[in-house]
C-alpha cells in the first residue's frame, strides 16, 4: 500500500500548528465533492495523522503522515515571523522520520 506524505501550507495542514505556539491554525475537517457528509471515502485512513501529534507514532509514516503547517513557505524569515514550520523543515522532519523507521 503506498503512503501519502503531506507537505505544505494551510491548504493541507492537518493540525500540526495546534502543537506549536502560533496564531495560524487550519482547524477544518477535510471536505470536497468526494466527501459525503464530510467523511472521507475510499482511503486507507480517514485523516493522516499530524507529525507533531503526540498520539502519532514514527511507524505511521509507512501509511502516511501530515507534515504541513498553516502559513508555511520556503522563506525562513517569513516563517519565523509567523511561527510556522517552513517547507524545507517539513522535509527535514520527513527525512528524520524515515531514518527512525
Image (tube, rainbow, N blue to C red):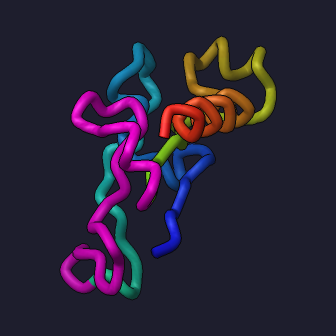
Return the x and y of residue 46 as percentages of the image width and height.
27, 67
Residue 7 sits above or below residue 44 on the image: above
Residue 81 sits above or below residue 88 on the image: above
Return the x and y of residue 90 as percentages of the image width and height.
62, 34
Is residue 39 rendered to the left or right of residue 75? left
Say which residue appears at 30% left-offset and 67% top-offset: 45
Return the x and y of residue 99 as percentages of the image width and height.
59, 34
Is residue 35 rendered to the left or right of residue 82? left
What predominant SS class does the magenta segment belong to?
A: loop
User: Depth check: 63 or 69 in front?
Assistant: 63
Say which residue appears at 34% left-offset and 24% top-offset: 19
Q: Looking at the rendering, which quadrant does residue 81 occupy?
A: top right
Was residue 52 drawn as part of the magenta stretch in this picture?
yes
Give the magenta range. 36-63
Return the x and y of residue 37 as percentages of the image width and height.
19, 80
Say which residue appears at 34% left-offset and 48% top-offset: 49
Residue 1 sits above or below residue 49 on the image: below
User: Depth check: 68 or 11 in front?
Assistant: 68
Q: Looking at the rendering, which quadrant does residue 51 occupy?
A: top left
Amino acid at each position: 500500500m503506498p503512503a501519502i506524505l503531506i507537505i505544505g501550507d494551510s491548504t493541507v495542514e492537518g493540525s500540526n500548528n495546534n502543537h506549536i505556539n502560533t496564531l495560524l491554525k487550519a482547524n477544518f475537517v477535510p471536505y470536497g465533492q468526494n466527501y459525503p457528509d464530510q467523511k472521507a471515502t475510499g482511503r486507507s485512513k480517514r485523516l493522516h495523522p499530524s507529525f507533531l501529534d503526540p498520539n502519532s507514532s514514527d511507524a505511521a509514516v509507512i501509511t502516511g503522515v501530515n507534515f504541513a503547517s498553516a502559513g508555511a513557505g520556503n522563506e525562513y524569515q517569513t516563517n519565523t515571523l509567523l511561527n510556522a514550520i517552513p517547507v524545507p523543515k517539513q522535509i527535514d522532519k520527513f527525512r528524520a522520520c524515515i531514518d527512525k523507521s
